[in-house]
Structures are given as structure tokens and as C-alpha cells.
């Protein structure tokens, strides 16, 4: 990063990961001295979601500790419970966690910076809790990880003001914890058409005729409804393929 805020006594860092079988991304948000630092990066080696969570925590802590000075306190807020247990010593310390996290903790000790790891509910426990700052910033960290998982780096520093949520969400269409949460449980009309391999107009007709559940507030279709239709389409295709199959003599 070419720009960073001044040091302060208390620095908060929110980290999260986004993972599937073929890609993984990490994201972190640092709140320091009235500034906001956001970064999302792909995780090169994908094995489990734990790799993304630990990578996000490592990079977020490293940058946050660099901003500190002797007597500063860095508070890592994570929804990854094993890492919070590691930090509070309530469970046996895993070698995996020690190998990745211990070096930054040693760096903090050398600089006289205290590190605390706190567990928070993932993504606020639901969209109704995004009024809480911790939930919203954790949600933004997850959004950053999602951007990174698609292969794009994201880095931005800005001053934290009264309209910070609107300003952050205006930076990228995916920087919206509420909508990002919806994408995990539902699809809009165009996304549904792509998932089913049919025209958007046909999906609109299904909605108009009540053949799929449709949320009139969010204008989205629940994934369970999309999957039910997809199953029916696949069954029809299999039946059609069976009828068209002519046994060889």
C-alpha cells in the first residue's frame, strides 16, 4: 500500500475468507485512527477454507501491527471459531495455526503491540444484524474475499466518516454485505436463467404463473426453488434422451 493512516492506540482488524472447490480468496478491513484500509487477495494454494481464513488473519494482522507502536492494541475480529480459540488458549494450539500466526504475534511482541483475537458471529448472524458495526465490517471483509476469489485484487484506503457505508458500497457492486448474503441463498431473474440454462423471459413467466417462489421485497428466487426446477428439467432431459435412443442391432 502506498498510503496508510497514522498510528493510534487501538486498531481493529476484520478478516474473512471465501472458498469453494476451485478457488479461494481472503479479505480484511482495518479501522485505524479514523481511516479504513480494505484489501482482498486471491489465495494461491487452495485446499480448505481454513487456508483462506488463516491467510486473511495473517495478512490483516501483519498490516495492522505495522500501524501500531509500543503500547498499541490490535484487536482481530474473526468469525472463524478455531482461530479465536487459538487466540484465547481455550483449545490445544494447532501446529497449523502456530506456523502461520505465531510469526506475526512475535512481530507484535517485538514492537510492544498487544494482540487480542475475538470471535464474532459470521456476517452478523443474518441481515437484520448488519446495523451492528462489527457485523457490517466482517461482512465487508467477506465481500472483499469474494471479489478476490474471482481472481481480482482489491485495495483501497479512505477516511472513515458518517457516510462510510454508502461510500464503501459505492466502490464496487459486490461491497454490500446484505446483497452478498442474498447471493448465497437466492438468485435474481437473470442469475436464475443462467443457472437453469433457459431464457430470462421464461423465468419471468414461471414467476408470473406462480411456479416458483418469489420474494417481492428482494426480487429474488430462493435457491431451493431454483434447484427444484433444475431437477425437473434434468429429469425431462433424461426421459427425452431415453426416448430418442435407438438400440443398435
Image (spheres, grey):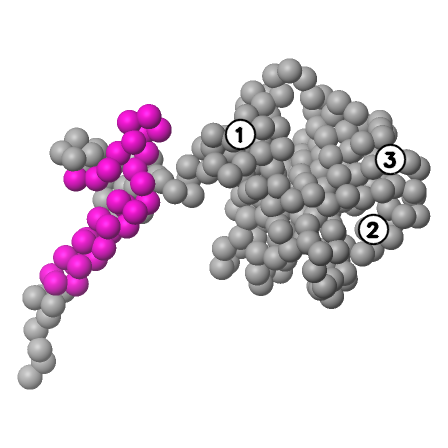
Q: Are the residues at dot 2 and dot 1 in contact (C-beta closer than 8 Å)?
A: no
Q: Nearer the viewer, residue 26 or 201?
A: 26
What is the crowding at mark 2: few (fewer than 14 residues within 10 Å), some, or many (at least 20)? some
Quadrant of the rendered structure where residue 152 is? Answer: top right
Q: Secondary structure at mark 2?
A: helix
Magenta extent: 211-240
Q: Quadrant of the C terminus?
A: bottom left
Q: Secondary structure at mark 3?
A: loop
Q: Residue at x 61, y 16 (%)?
A: 163
Name the mark on residue 72: 3
Percent coordinates x, y for residue 157 in the rendering: 71, 28
Q: Position of residue 230 (x, y in %)?
A: 24, 51
Which image quadrant for residue 237? Answer: bottom left
Identify the residue at the far top of this view. 162
Which residue, given by chain and number where applicable, does mark 2 sit on? 105
Residue 83 location in percent, x, y? Answer: 68, 53
Give the Cα separation between the discs numbered 2 and 3.
Answer: 13 Å
Q: Measuring 26% from the left and 34% from the top, which residue is drawn there?
A: 214
> Does the stretch in magenta take in 163?
no
The residues bearing labels 1 and 3 have C-alpha atoms spaced at a distance of 28 Å
Q: Which of marks 3 and 1 precedes in the sequence?
A: 3
Toward which corner of the image does residue 166 lie, by quadrant? Answer: top right
Mark 1 neighbour class, 10 Å CA radius: few under 14, some 14 to 19, many 20 or more = some
Which quadrant would the N terminus be assigned to in this image?
A: top right
Residue carrying label 1: 130
Q: Residue furthest front?
A: 90
Q: Is residue 184 left or right of residue 237?
A: right
Q: Main secondary structure of the magenta part?
A: helix
Q: Which numbered disc, 2 or 1, marks the residue that appears first in the sequence?
A: 2
Amino acid at each position: 500500500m502506498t498510503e496508510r493512516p497514522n498510528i493510534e492506540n487501538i486498531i481493529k482488524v476484520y478478516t474473512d475468507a471465501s472458498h469453494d472447490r476451485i478457488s479461494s480468496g481472503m479479505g480484511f478491513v482495518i479501522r485505524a485512527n479514523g481511516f479504513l484500509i480494505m484489501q482482498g487477495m486471491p489465495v494461491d494454494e487452495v485446499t480448505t477454507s481454513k487456508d483462506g481464513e488463516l491467510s486473511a488473519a495473517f495478512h490483516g494482522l501483519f498490516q495492522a501491527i505495522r500501524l501500531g507502536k509500543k503500547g498499541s492494541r490490535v484487536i482481530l475480529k474473526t468469525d472463524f471459531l478455531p482461530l479465536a480459540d487459538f487466540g484465547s488458549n481455550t483449545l490445544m494450539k494447532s501446529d497449523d495455526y502456530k506456523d502461520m500466526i505465531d510469526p506475526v504475534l512475535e512481530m507484535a511482541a517485538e514492537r510492544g503491540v498487544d494482540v487480542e483475537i475475538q470471535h464474532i458471529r459470521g456476517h452478523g448472524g443474518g441481515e437484520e444484524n448488519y446495523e451492528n458495526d462489527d457485523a457490517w465490517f466482517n461482512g465487508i471483509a467477506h465481500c472483499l474475499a469474494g471479489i478476490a476469489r474471482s481472481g481480482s485484487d482489491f485495495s483501497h484506503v479512505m477516511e472513515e466518516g458518517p457516510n462510510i457505508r454508502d461510500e464503501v458500497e459505492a466502490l464496487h457492486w459486490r461491497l454490500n454485505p446484505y446483497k452478498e448474503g442474498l447471493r448465497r441463498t437466492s438468485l435474481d431473474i437473470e442469475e436464475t436463467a443462467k443457472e437453469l440454462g433457459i431464457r430470462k423471459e421464461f423465468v419471468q413467466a414461471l414467476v408470473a404463473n406462480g411456479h416458483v417462489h418469489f420474494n417481492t421485497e428482494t426480487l429474488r428466487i430462493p435457491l431451493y426453488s431454483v434447484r427444484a426446477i433444475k431437477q425437473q428439467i434434468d429429469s425431462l432431459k433424461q426421459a427425452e434422451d431415453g426416448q430418442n435412443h435407438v438400440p443398435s442391432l
